[in-house]
Amino acid sequence: MAHILIVEARFYDHLNDLLVAGARGAIEAAGHSCEVLTVPGALELPGAIAMASERGRWDAFVALGVVIRGETYHFEIVANESARGIMALTMDGVAIGNGVLTTEDEAQAIVRADPAQLDKGGAAAKAALALLDLRDRMG
Ligand SMILES: Nc1c(NC[C@H](O)[C@H](O)[C@H](O)CO)[nH]c(=O)[nH]c1=O
Ligand SMILES: CC(=O)[C@@H](O)COP(=O)(O)O
């Protein structure tokens, strides 16, 4: 059984609740356990996962959050830099499923976060578990 850390950027409470429910459901359905750690926004996700990874208490990580386009260039910074940081950790061998939604509006985010619709939280959890499985099979 693997122990997974879900790291959620809690910028939009109602959307995060959906993402976390999907991720938790996928992890538990696969017979694994999880904990949830909350950070303020998507830009904090890579740093938080890096810190947690150093502790060695979790086998894999699920990054969750929602970035919705506003009026300024801030959207690009938050969306791109969050993804870049998560990808950098992945390239260092940290098993991470990326479930950070980057959408034009809230309606797009709801469809993607809802476990009964596109369930991107569940998909990110399954991706993290797939990386763990790959690592195990590599020996
Ligand atoms: N605009 C969004 C943010 N912005 C906040 C940043 O992620 C960060 O917390 C702040 O700059 C302090 O370092 N975060 C989201 O997750 N979603 C957004 O739409
Ligand atoms: C991530 C964003 O684009 C948003 O939260 C910020 O909005 P704005 O660009 O209108 O300040």
Image: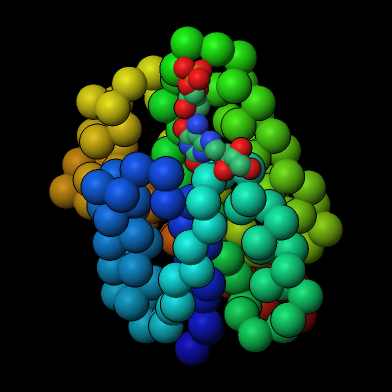
Q: Which residue is drawn at 28% across and 27% down?
A: 106
Residue 62 relative to residue 27: left or right: right
Task: Residue lying at the far right in this picture: please name it.
Answer: 92
Q: Which residue is drawn at 25% across and 47% down?
A: 14
Protein image colouring: rainbow
Q: In this view, does 101 lie above or below 70?
A: below
Query: Where 128 sits versus 77, above or below?
Result: below
- Residue 42 makes an appearance in the image: yes
Say which of 42 and 109 sits in front: 42
Quadrant occupied by the C terminus:
bottom right
How many marks the image carries: the answer is 0
Q: Residue furthest bottom?
A: 1
Residue 108 screen position, x and y as percent? 29, 26
Query: Quick check: 61 left or right of 9?
Result: right
Residue at 73% from the left image edge and 68% from the top image edge: 51
In the rendered image, residue 103, in percent from the top left (x then y), is placed at 41, 25
Residue 22 visible in the snapshot: no
Q: In x, y percent, where is residue 8?
A: 47, 57
**Res. 92 image quadrant:** bottom right
Position above or below: 107 against 98: above
Q: Quadrant of residue 95?
A: bottom right
- Residue ID at (52%, 75%): 4
Looking at the image, the residue that sits furthest to the top is: 71
Q: In the picture provided, is 32 more to the left or to the right than 49?
A: left
Q: For this rendering, which residue is in front, 85 or 26? A: 85
Q: Please tell me which residue lies in front, 28 or 101.
A: 101
Q: Where is residue 55 in the image (x, y as percent from the top left)?
A: 73, 81
The answer to which image quadrant residue 133 occupies is: bottom right
